[in-house]
Image (tube, helix red, strand yellow):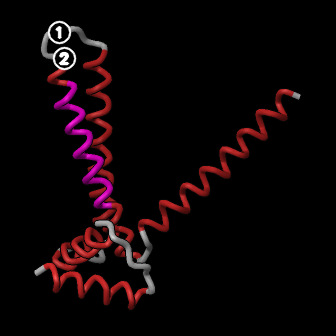
């Protein structure tokens, strides 16, 4: 089975001019594509955005609960922190998958967007540093 998947992965990489890597990134993308192709709501961007908002809400709830438990004092605090942060981690994972699905729907590379976001963040930090220097003068 892996040989067949490896052939598909390499062929798709050649078709897209994507460099071959030894990591799991491409395999995950292929699995996501297969799952998305089975989705009855494939192509419905409003539906996808609703799911993204739902998952973001789960992440927000877990974060708020974790902060509340951090200010509480009772015996089970550590167990509850782990459980709540586990929910937060799962919510973040679900959110990332849905964001990746959205990217697939519109033809964007998730990895390229991460690089673009990092580049933009670095530029913004340069702006912040420059502004801070101007304020000091």
- Measuring from the top left, give residue 94's x and y in whole percent: 25, 53
| Circle 1 residue | 74
Name the side, left or right, on which 19 lies relative to 26.
right
- Measuring from the top left, give residue 112's x and y in whole percent: 49, 68
CB-based contact (under 8 Å), mark 1 and mark 2: yes
Give how far apart the Cα atoms at labels 1 and 2 are. Answer: 6 Å
Give the quadrant of the N terminus.
bottom left
Name the side, left or right, on which 109 lies relative to 132.
left
Depth check: give the residue in front, 56 or 71. Answer: 71
Depth check: give the residue in front, 53 or 120. Answer: 120
Q: Quadrant of residue 98?
A: bottom left
Q: Give the residue drawn at x 32%, y 23%.
A: 67
- SS of the residue at dot 2? helix
Q: Is residue 133 above or below residue 97?
A: above
Q: Give the residue drawn at x 32%, y 72%.
A: 26
Query: Crowding near pointer 1: few (<14 within 10 Å), some, many (20+)?
Result: few
Asked if the stretch drawn in magenta spans residue 97, the answer is yes
Query: Crowding near pointer 2: few (<14 within 10 Å), some, many (20+)?
Result: some
Q: Give the residue drawn at x 55%, y 62%.
A: 116
Q: Give the residue drawn at x 14%, y 23%.
A: 79
Q: Quadrant of residue 33?
A: bottom left
| Circle 2 residue | 77
- SS of the residue at dot 1? loop
- In the picture as drawn, the residue positioned furthest to the right comes out as 137
**Range covered by the magenta-colored residues:** 81-98
- In the picture as drawn, the residue positioned furthest to the left comes out as 1
- Measuring from the top left, give residue 71's x and y in whole percent: 31, 13
Q: Is residue 112 above or below residue 68?
A: below
């Amino acid at each position: 089975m892996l040989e067949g998947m490896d052939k598909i992965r390499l062929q798709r990489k050649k078709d897209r001019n994507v460099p071959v890597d030894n990591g799991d990134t491409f395999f995950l993308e292929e699995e996501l594509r297969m799952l998305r192709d089975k989705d009855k709501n494939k192509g419905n961007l409003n539906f996808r955005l609703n799911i993204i908002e739902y998952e973001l809400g789960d992440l927000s709830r877990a974060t708020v609960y974790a902060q509340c438990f951090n200010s509480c004092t009772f015996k089970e605090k550590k167990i509850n922190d782990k459980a709540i942060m586990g929910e937060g981690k799962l919510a973040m994972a679900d959110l990332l998958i849905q964001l990746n699905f959205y990217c697939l729907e519109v033809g964007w590379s998730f990895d390229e967007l991460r690089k673009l976001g990092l580049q933009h963040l670095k530029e913004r930090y340069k702006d912040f540093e420059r502004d801070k220097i101007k304020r000091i003068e």
